[in-house]
Image (cartoon, rainbow, N blue to C red):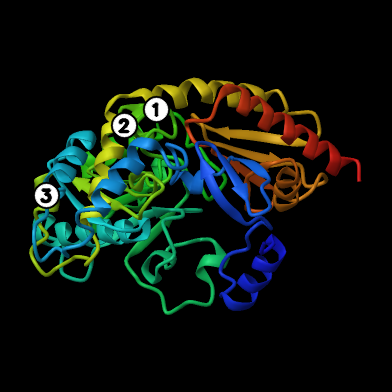
Amino acid sequence: MITSAELIEVSERRSAHNYHPLPVVIREAEGAWVTDVEGKRYLDCLSGYSSLNFGHRHPKIIEAAREQLDRLTLTSRAFYHDQFAQFCAGLGDLTGKDMILPMNTGAEAVETAIKVARKWGYDVKGVEPGKANIIVMENNFHGRTTTIISFSTDPEAHDGFGPYTPGFKIVPYGSADAVRQAIDPETVAVLVEPIQGEAGVLVPPDGYLTELREICSAEGVLLIADEIQSGLGRTGHTFACDHEGVVPDIYVLGKALGGGVVPVSAIAADRDVLGVIHPGQHGSTFGGNPLACAVANAVIEILNTGEFQARAAKLGEVLHGRLRELVGHGSIVEVRGRGLWAGVDIHPDVGTGREVSKALLKRGVLAKDTHGSTIRLAPPIVVTEDDLHWAVDQLVDAVYELQSR
């Protein structure tokens, strides 16, 4: 047997250190649980940053992938394939949009939305070429490409990678007035996460998204919602924007769209927006490939039942009810989130988020820290109520242990 320690040593020696993983080596998984190479089981409370909303190896999704693997995996977009039409129509119906543009990763989808918004600004709004600007939010996380990190306010993502791409205005998250004041005649879009995941599962004030929708409509500006982490059932609705009944001009989707099997991303918009893209202006050899479409089609069918959205809402009440009980007793300062998604702020005197995550790891719970003293909890929606209670019990024990040092 190759041990976890041996595998970690080789990984650290032979790979770039662009991540700081917890010391666990996972070998197999099913549902909400994973198993390491030594055979120890863990409850996955990160879900691949929402990529695994439907759990590890969901039977319907795996079946779709296996069937497609036996037939066709790639054509490139030089040709049509038999899964593509269903994918476009299905995702279009799910989002209520006319058209979709498929890519692979979430960052690619954000880049696609940026390009489309600029092209729309020049072709439809009449902005002078090269002058378009997009309003973005402080503490955003939309990926780590050169363009995206150009408007990041996170020093780790931003610093040391210049020169930076121009054309973005950064305003405080949660302030509709700041957005209103930042708009000028050359503004083509407002890009927002309905809930900021990487920033610590920050939920904006009630009515914020509604105000953004009203402002963008009045000013002739596109509203772009990055639902890569918040969408596809995670918060108890299909999209986090649904909590306010807001429909953006462009949905940006990824992560869970691939069912935890393959990278799948896309943007969805109406014809008057996506119709500005013409052959040769944007694309990807693997974007919308047969295997990806077959997997995504299974995901869309699952979402169309509404079962997972309802389950996330119900279990989210359990999770947040338990977590709120822990606030104000010296160890946990604040809890935020919606559905099966929570950001838990640990008092700095107790320990860092990483220390808490490592203490949870010892107890069989996988979670991950962000921004120092915050941990994120986002179990797969297939998690049971008993599993949730057990996970919170482990959090209580982990914090108590750290306090007692």
Q: Give the side of residue 130 with respect to residue 144, left or right.
A: left
Query: Around disc 2, counting alpha carbons within 10 Å, would you say few (fewer than 14), some (14 to 19), or many (20 or more)?
Result: some
Q: Earlier in the sequence, mark 3 or mark 1?
A: 3
Residue farthest right in this picture: 405
Q: Earlier in the sequence, mark 3 or mark 2?
A: 3
Indicate the amino acid at tag 1. Answer: Phe
Q: In this orientation, does residue 376 appear?
A: yes
Q: Give the side of residue 346 with respect to residue 378, left or right.
A: right
Indicate the amino acid at tag 2. Answer: Ile
Residue tagged by mark 3? Answer: 82
User: Relative to 322, does residue 302 appear above or below in the rendering?
Assistant: below
Cα separation between marks 2 and 1: 8 Å
Q: Quadrant of residue 375?
A: top right
Q: Quadrant of residue 394?
A: top right
The tag on residue 228 is none
* Disc 2 to disc 1: CB gap under 8 Å: yes
Residue 292 horizontal/vertical position (percent): 27, 52
Residue 307 horizontal/vertical position (percent): 36, 23
Cα separation between marks 3 and 1: 27 Å
Cα separation between marks 3 and 2: 20 Å
Identify the residue at horizontal 51%, vertical 40% (top origin). Answer: 30
Residue tagged by mark 1? Answer: 308
Query: Around disc 3, counting alpha carbons within 10 Å, would you say few (fewer than 14), some (14 to 19), or many (20 or more)?
Result: few
Residue tagged by mark 2? Answer: 302
- Of badges 3 and 2, the one in the foreground is 3
Q: Quadrant of the N terminus?
A: bottom right
